Image (spheres, rainbow, N blue to C red):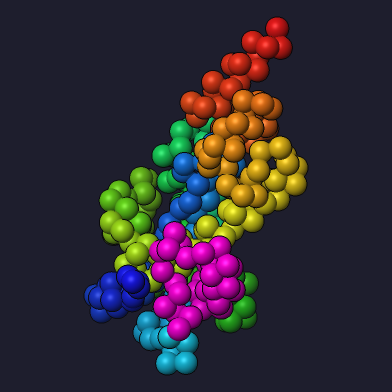
Amino acid sequence: MEISNFILEKDFASQGYTHIIGTDEVGRGPLCGPVLACAAMFKDINFEIPAEKVKQFDLIRDSKKLSEKQREEIFEFIGEHFYLGIGLCDHETIDRINILEASFLSMKKAIQDLQRIMNEESRIKNGNPNSVIHDSKFLILVDGNKEIPNLSIEQYPVIGGDKLVKSISAASIVAKVTRDRIMEQMHEKYPNYGLDKHKGYGTKVHMQALIEFGPCPIHRKSFAPVKKSLKKSQTLAK
């Protein structure tokens, strides 16, 4: 079984980078709901794993290789050991700017949220309401083969990063759990679609519900199956 590690983070730390942040997104494929990203930075600047916590850190790997129960179990642990930022783009934004751009925007929002959280901690620690992180060399480790456009921070894309790089693995798990929880809440509002089971992906059950009930308010109207269902609903309404 492939387990991610801190080798890449340590390598960049040895080159003088002081804030090495992994980022990943989830929700590009579903027919409804938001695309959501997480930015994660390990709190130990030496990237050392305590011997008594190796088992838990080994669970921080590609979120797709974990069961829902395992992701939930490790979620709080990640929050204890990583600084975390969350960013999302809702279905309306996805329809307006397309899913790829919305994915990039959600990652930028996550990075900004992480910086905000670290600055708040700096203010509390220093007892200075105007304190911000100074003299820091940031690096964003991005899952995939593309850099985030229009981002002023230095980046390093990593193909398969959620499987290889511990900070990206942590981000992938937190993003997945956070989005799944949102979709479970949406299921309570729109129970006809089975969102608590498939989280908005185009399963057979979901496609059948689209045919039977038409789109709900959080469906992505720019996605082909939803667009087709919407046209059918409009035709039947005439």
From the top left corner, tell me how far across and down residue 84 is, in percent: 52, 67
Magenta stretch?
Answer: 55-84
Q: Is residue 89 above or below residue 169?
A: above
Q: Is residue 81 magenta?
A: yes
Q: Quadrant of the N terminus?
A: bottom left
Instruction: Tell me, yes or no, if residue 182 can be seen here.
Output: yes
Residue at image position (32%, 70%) is 2
Left or right of 4 in this view: 201: right
Residue at image position (47%, 65%) is 66
**Magenta: predominant secondary structure element?**
helix
From the top left corner, tell me how far across and down residue 101 is, in percent: 43, 39
Residue at image position (66%, 26%) is 212
Q: Is residue 204 above or below residue 132?
A: above
Instruction: Tell me, yes or no, if residue 116 can be seen here.
Output: no
Left or right of 112 in this view: 33: right
Quadrant in the picture for residue 57 = bottom left
Spot the residue most to the bottom. Answer: 51
From the top left corner, tell me how far across and down residue 50 is, in percent: 44, 90
Q: Is residue 178 above or below residue 132?
A: above
Residue at image position (57%, 42%) is 200
* 68 vs 230, nearest the viewer: 68
Spot the residue most to the right. Answer: 189
Q: Count the marks: how many?
A: 0
From the top left corner, tell me how far across and down residue 237 is, in percent: 71, 12
Q: Quadrant of the C terminus?
A: top right
Quadrant in the picture for residue 213 = top right
Spot the residue most to the top. Answer: 238
Q: Is residue 105 magenta?
A: no
